[in-house]
């Protein structure tokens, strides 16, 4: 074998090792929670992968919304003493099955509004660790915002209601799905409302349920045209 052939062989081996290393890094990369839609008609997913391919689940075990909120609140108030809860949102990794959904635990995003600054700061909570994400101006629809003290239904309770009311059957029928939970304390109806959506990118079908986060009662879903 000539010297040139040896050199080319070595370069090819190095290239294959680099490609394998990059592939492993991308495969085990943690899933970061993203913003969630408010209504099922507003779900817009731009998938660059085959929707039938199940993505890796998050490396984070996660926690329920109220447990994560307790950690986020401490940080938010330390940063801005008058900060109050504005919103909570989470999604479960694409392709999560019943085992990953049933306990209502995942990573969460919380928005905290400061009346003195007129801004909202967003924090992410993963396994008890709180990370500041961003800050932006915000004008509430109602004043004051609904007190977080009226929030009684945690994400695990909301999830069980969601599954029992139709999400479990939806997963069994549709297969690979994406689930999002969200609520806001800036609600003119004067109560905190869990908005829960499960969506199939393969078929375009979705199931949505809204629940009063204080009483646990179902809230009618009004779809915009």
Image (tube, rainbow, N blue to C red):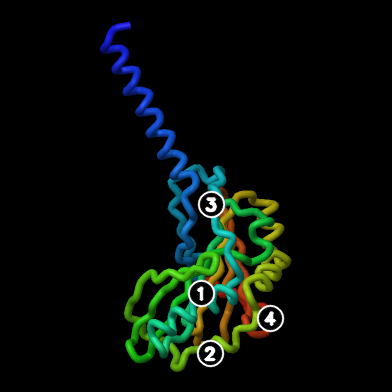
- Asked if disc 2 and disc 4 are in contact, CB closer than 8 Å, the reply is no
In front: label 2 or label 4: 2
In front: label 1 or label 3: 1
- Provide the residue designation for mark 2: 147
Number of residues whose C-alpha sits closer than 10 Å to that of mark 1, classed few (under 14), some (14–19) or many (20 or more): many
- State which tag comes first along the sequence, 4 or 1: 1
CA separation, marks 3 and 2? Answer: 36 Å
**Under tag 1, what secondary structure?**
strand
Q: Position of residue 150 (x, y in %)?
A: 60, 88
- Asked if disc 1 and disc 2 are in contact, CB closer than 8 Å, the reply is no
CA separation, marks 2 and 4? Answer: 18 Å
- Provide the residue designation for mark 1: 88
Q: Position of residue 152 (x, y in %)?
A: 64, 83
Number of residues whose C-alpha sits closer than 10 Å to that of mark 3, classed few (under 14), some (14–19) or many (20 or more): many
CA separation, marks 4 and 1? Answer: 19 Å
**Under tag 2, what secondary structure?**
loop
Q: Residue at x 49, y 76 (%)?
A: 72
In front: label 4 or label 1: 1
- Provide the residue designation for mark 3: 201
């Amino acid at each position: 074998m000539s010297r040139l052939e040896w050199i080319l062989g070595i370069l090819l081996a190095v290239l294959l090792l680099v490609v394998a290393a990059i592939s492993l890094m991308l495969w085990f990369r943690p899933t970061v929670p993203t913003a969630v839609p408010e209504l099922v008609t507003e779900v817009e997913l731009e998938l660059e992968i085959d929707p039938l391919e199940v993505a890796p689940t998050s490396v984070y075990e996660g926690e329920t919304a109220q447990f994560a909120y307790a950690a986020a609140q401490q940080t938010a108030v330390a940063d801005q003493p008058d900060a109050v809860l504005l919103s909570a949102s989470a999604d479960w990794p694409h392709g999560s099955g019943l085992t990953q959904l049933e306990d209502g635990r995942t990573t969460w995003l919380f928005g905290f509004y400061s009346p003195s600054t007129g801004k909202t700061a967003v924090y992410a909570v993963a396994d008890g660790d709180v990370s500041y994400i961003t800050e932006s101006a915000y004008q509430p629809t109602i004043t004051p915002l609904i007190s977080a003290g009226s929030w009684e239904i945690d994400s695990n309770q909301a999830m069980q209601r969601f599954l029992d009311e139709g999400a479990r059957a939806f997963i069994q029928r549709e297969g690979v799905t994406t689930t999002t939970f969200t609520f806001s304390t800036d609600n003119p109806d004067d109560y905190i409302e869990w908005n829960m959506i499960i969506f199939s990118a393969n078929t375009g079908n979705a199931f949505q349920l809204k629940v009063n986060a204080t009483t646990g009662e179902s809230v009618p879903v009004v779809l915009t045209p």
